Amino acid sequence: MSAKLTEFMVQNYAKAVTMDLAEWLSLNPLPSFCEPKSDGFRVFVFKSNDKILLATRHGGIYSESTHPILFRKIETLKAPELPQRIIFDGEYIAPDQLHIFDLLRIDDRDLMSQILLERKKILSELLSGERKSFEVPSVLANSFQEIQDYKKSEVSKDGEGIIVKNPSSFYRQKNSWLKLKRFDTLDCFVTGIERTQEMERTGVPHSWYMGIFDENDRVLEIGKVGTYLKDVDPSRINIGTVVEVQYQQFTEDKKLRGPFIIKIRDDKTKEECKISQIPGYSN
């Protein structure tokens, strides 16, 4: 059963693209929904009668036995007044936060072919009352500047950025969700380890060569990074490890300027590290 839930998520979850806002708006006319961007693990929430399971894209299954703190908090999703079977889309943030932003199915009713505006109306009805805290807040922006102002507001609250969505889009409609991050960051993977004097002394690497996949799915070497945030454990970064790197510029010769590692991404695979993350590039 758990394998089927994970397979369903992999086949069905919607992705947010990274591109210039003006370019995105040329494909998705205003108005736009704006939501705060969470920094958690993407999950589908499967409710069946009084049982709930959360599934990730990489085979993770969260249940009452594995995550008791979370499941005590989301007990209200089992309420008898709710439909017997529901599939939500959202993010889990350890240890006990669940942020729900979309709705895929109610009983035998597939909602993915309905537009986002209608899905959100139904979602708000399901997450009313004491369940309201699970719903990701959103605003309807009517201009380019309103979107920029919303991003600025979220960043000022130490947020990760925002997701902008086309209210008239179907679930998984191409380019209908846009990711606007707080900083320029890139998910990339380690292609090699530089043997520095520090590594010779301690046995722990402190400098790595990074890569992403280019437009033709070939590995593109994008330079070296040797700095990282203090809560990043360098002993966990080896060849093939996926990390999130903040950088100042992606240069014309396709190298990172001023990079440093801000997070190890256990929730990502290297196959997801594509040049399309960078505005102006497609993959």
Image (tube, helix red, strand yellow):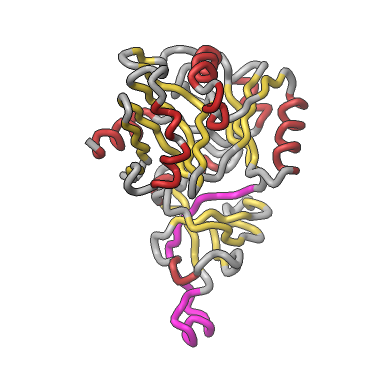
Residue found 34% across the figure and 49% down from its top = 66
| Left or right: 206 in relation to 104 | right
| Left or right: 236 in relation to 21 | left
| Left or right: 262 in relation to 148 | left
Q: Magenta stretch: residue 186 in it?
A: yes
> Who is closer to the viewer here, 24 or 156?
156
Residue found 45% across the figure and 22% down from its top = 103
Residue found 41% across the figure and 15% down from its top = 111
View extreme (left): residue = 1
Q: In the rendering, at what x and y percent does residue 234 appear?
A: 50, 70
Q: In the rendering, at what x and y percent does residue 201 appear?
A: 49, 87
Q: In the rendering, at what x and y percent does residue 48 appear?
A: 31, 26
Q: Magenta stretch: residue 209 in it?
A: no
Vertical relation: 219 (above or below) 106? below
Question: Is there any visible trace of residue 41 in the rendered image?
Answer: yes
Question: Which image quarter: residue 236?
Answer: bottom left
Vertical relation: 192 (above or below) 144? below
Count up the numbered dots: 0
Q: In the rendering, at what x and y percent does residue 101 appear?
A: 52, 28
Q: Which residues are magenta?
A: 184-205
Viewport quadrant of the N terminus: top left
View extreme (bottom): residue = 201
Question: Is there any visible trace of residue 221 in the rendered image?
Answer: no
| Left or right: 4 in relation to 149 | left
Residue found 46% across the figure and 77% down from its top = 204
